[in-house]
Image (cartoon, grey):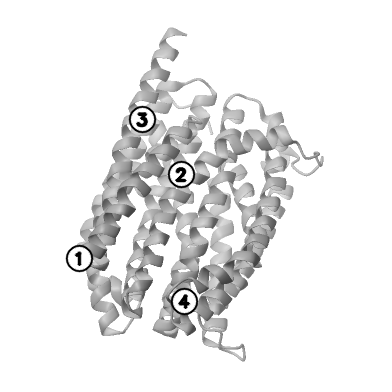
Amino acid sequence: MYQTHTLQEKLRQFLSVLLPILVSQLALFSMTFFDTIMSGHAGPVDLAGVAIGSSIWVPIQSGLTGILLAVTPMVAQLVGAMRKDQVPFTVIQALYLSVVIGVAVILCGALVLEPILNSMSLETDVREIARRYLIALSFGIVPMFVYTVLRCFIDALGMTRVTMIITLISLPINVALNYLLIFGKFGFPRLGGVGAGVASAITYWCITLISLYVVHRVQPFTEYRMFSRMFRVSLPAWKELLRLGVPIGFSIFFEVSIFAAVTLLMSQFNTVTIAAHQAAMNFASFIYMVPLSISMSLTIVVGFEVGAKRFRDARQYSFLGIGIALMMASLFAVGLFLFSQQVAGFYTTDPDVLQLTQHFLMYSILFLLSDAVAAPIQGILRGYKDVTVPFVAALVSYWVIGLPLGYLLANYTSLAAFGYWIGLIAGLAAGAVFLFGRLLLMQRRTVKADAAA
């Protein structure tokens, strides 16, 4: 990372940070993408089981990893302020915290998984696949959280190409294991959707081990001598991480969990509806990796400029990122409108599921435009370490507006399952409006403070 002076320099630096993050996010999400596609080809029951399992796990994973995302703005601001000597302490404390979080999730899961699944109106086979899928996935929980911290450290230095390479190495491993374990090839047992959970757990271990090696042995990370000194656990440092990370985690949780809640509420419908909903939602989530990557990149560049007290530069980066996100969302929306049948065909060959998936995909177009505004702004505000108001905005827009509206439309109108999607769209749009207002207020304050100084 370096100081920029012109818009062209900012665009060049922003793209150099963004493109590797985008490739990494697409590759990481491809693990879930291939889990869903390959489980779907194993059968509708396997697809529905993985869908239910993912709907339980993904909100928890996203919320807790969101806590650890606090490492990115903290390290970025330390580097921007030329306080690099404090970076190792921050990262090591985050690693300790990640292990504690991972172990706590496993213990809680052992207690509540069965009651949660039994409380749902699921077919017996679907419930069993979901249970075994989550158990298999649990063996990769701790390394996944550890990897999140290491990736935040690497990315905060602007070395996003490194995490891209790590992820690209691990993706073929995941796909190959899916093929072997889901379909039982080359003498491996045919596990169906459960095999996707086993493959993901093994892949998380691979990513983590590679990242540990890179941080320990590869330049420029070796300059930080990350593991040369093992710091004691510092509760004040954990408090600082949690003060910033918990609102981030809850904001992500509220956004992700509303989608998961809708999928769980879909259990009142038949297996075809669940499978079609999951297929369409999976593709919409895949496209979401673009604004999410822009958001993560903006946290890095904005955090770097804010740490150096260059608030006008931070503002320029902000609107540059939002503009790129809107342009990409428009292109994806047109493509999805024209090729919805081909997209649905990626997930299933069942004619009923295929037709219903196409209908759901049309609604997902409106997701794209709202996400193109909301996601980048979330990343910008994290760069400023402004996390409390976005947390409140997420709670209100998703759980006070989006989900209740969707429930009413789905249960008291003829829209049925489509009513939930309309509620989701309304919640996302409301969140985008709230966050944009907060961004304008925050930047007006910082620019005035900069001028006064």
Classify residue 244 as left or right of residue 417. Answer: right
Q: Nearer the viewer, residue 330 or 358?
A: 358
Residue name at image x 63 percent, y 54 percent: 145
Find out whether the residues at labels 1 and 2 contact each other: C-beta distance under 8 Å.
no
Mark 3 nearby-residue class (10 Å; few <14, some 14–19, many ≥20)? some
Residue 321 in the image: x percent, y percent? Answer: 36, 38
Choose top left, top right, bottom left or bottom right for residue 41.
bottom left
Find out whether the residues at labels 4 and 3 contact each other: C-beta distance under 8 Å.
no
Q: Secondary structure at mark 4?
A: helix
Compared to residue 394, the image places residue 198 above or below, namely below
The label number, if any, that marks residue 251 in the structure image: 2
Q: Nearer the viewer, residue 295 or 23?
A: 295
In terms of sequence position, does the residue under pointer 1 or pointer 3 come before the other? 1
Residue under numbered circle 3? 438
Classify residue 406 as left or right of residue 105. Answer: left
The amino acid beneath tag 3 is Arg
Residue under numbered circle 4? 49
Gap between marks 4 and 3 measured at Cα: 40 Å
Residue under numbered circle 1? 415
Residue 96 visible: yes
Q: From the image, which quarter does the N terminus lie in? A: top right
Gap between marks 4 and 2 measured at Cα: 27 Å
- Closest to the camera, between mark 1 and mark 3, is 1
